[in-house]
Amino acid sequence: AVQPRLFSRWTLRGVEFRNRVFLAPMCQYAARDGHPTDWHLVHYGARAAGGVGLVMLEATAVVPEGRISPADLGLWSDDHIPSLRRLTDFIRAQGAVAGIQLAHAGRKASCDVPANGEKPLPPERGGWPIFGASAVPFSSGHPTPRELDEAALADIVGNFARAAERALAAGFEVVEIHAAHGYLLHSFLSPLSNRRTDLYGGRFENRVRFPLEVVAAVRAAWPDHLPLFVRISATDWAEGGWDLDQSIRFADRLKDFGVDLVDASSGGLLPDAVPPAAPGYQVPFAQAIRARTGIATGAVGLITEPHQAEAVIASGSADAVLLGRELLRDPHWPLHAAAALGEDADWPTPYFRAR
Ligand code: FNR
């Protein structure tokens, strides 16, 4: 087999990516009633024109109460389809694949936008009641979520599936389920946030039950020829929490459920668990999950240098790299990286003279 490179094409199910440089999902906090604005078209459009293989849209709420903030994207209504279609049309026209991350923020919902301090929003400032795996707050400064009963869980499974159908109608070719960073699905996985005594809490098989129900429903609603990703936090960075061993077991199950790629992030469950951030610090998670289960993985977190990214792919640690903040700094990172690595990548025709 030919050794994969950062700038080699990659086909997953029926979708071909022109390279393995993916835009990491990043909330823009610029939506109105869940609808994208011109900001989204320009932001995502610029990264598509900048040469990424996949433009992964930010956490997009499957129900209004599942938004992190009032300025999150949403797909809880058919009304959201046309405004997102405008983005996917443009992204595809630039040669990139359009993906969308479907999310429910759980006990971390109903907060102000980061620019205003990210604090929980009181009702008088537009906040709403929050729900979680158990009645355990994110921090002492956060309200206590209401524990979801089984009927409510079944509703949320359906909400994820309906959102996936709308994503298809809006022209997306990849869906990523957000099961990381302390949001609703992660709060079921971790014993630190899941204190349930029913079928959805306790031993590993019970804690993964609700996330797997969501995955199964989305996989059933999402066409066979299109890839499904799941983002996880590979560890809570906390004693007694979710960890890499459980992530490997979970990834094995995800593979059986028809998931195509595990996007391996970490943290976010606890406010005070500080990850040891350093260049590529989460790459070992992608590497271990890929090696132990055979599922494709995405590596994310402080990947900023072309040769560093190339090494992640060439060493077989991951099948794709996701870049977040570096692609905020430089939308043309893939074009610059290709030049640094001696690879071909076409600048957009209107930028012909920039080469
Ligand atoms: C993020 N991140 C993030 N993650 C996610 O799964 N869904 C999201 O909507 C967001 N939103 C978001 C917004 C902003 C402004 C930042 C900076 C980050 C996390 C992001 O996808 C990525 O995992 C981290 O930023 C680490 O990668 P980098 O930035 O070191 O390349």
Image (cartoon, rainbow, N blue to C red):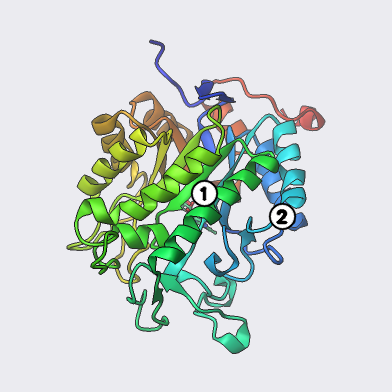
Task: From the viewer's side, name the closer residue of 197 and 184.
Answer: 197
Q: Considering only vertical position in the picture, is 156 above or below 346? A: below
Q: Who's the residue at 25% across and 41% down the image?
A: 248
The crowd level at tag 2 (other Cα within 10 Å; few <14, some 14-19, many 20+) is many
Q: Who's the residue at 28% across and 54% down the image?
A: 235
Q: Considering only vertical position in the picture, is 250 above or below 10? A: below
Provide the residue designation for mark 2: 80
| Three-letter residue code for mark 1 | Gly
Query: In the rendered image, which quarter is residue 97 located in?
Result: top right
Q: Earlier in the sequence, mark 2 or mark 1?
A: 2
Task: From the viewer's side, name the closer residue of 203 and 348.
Answer: 203
The spot of residue 129 in percent (x, y) is: 51, 79
Provide the residue designation for mark 1: 324
The spot of residue 241 in percent (x, y) is: 22, 61
On whether ligand 1 comes within 8 Å of the CB at mark 2, the answer is: no
The spot of residue 9 in percent (x, y) is: 54, 21
| Three-letter residue code for mark 2 | His
Quadrant into which the N terminus falls: top left
The crowd level at tag 1 (other Cα within 10 Å; few <14, some 14-19, many 20+) is some
Q: Who's the residue at 44% across and 50% down the image?
A: 214
Q: Who's the residue at 40% across and 83% down the image?
A: 141
Q: Is residue 220 visible?
A: yes
Task: From the viewer's side, name the closer residue of 290 and 275.
Answer: 290
Quadrant into which the C terminus falls: top right
The spot of residue 274 in percent (x, y) is: 31, 64
How far apart marks 2 and 1 lie (CA) works out to 25 Å
Q: In the rendered structure, find residue 269 and report the number of the disc placed on it.
A: none
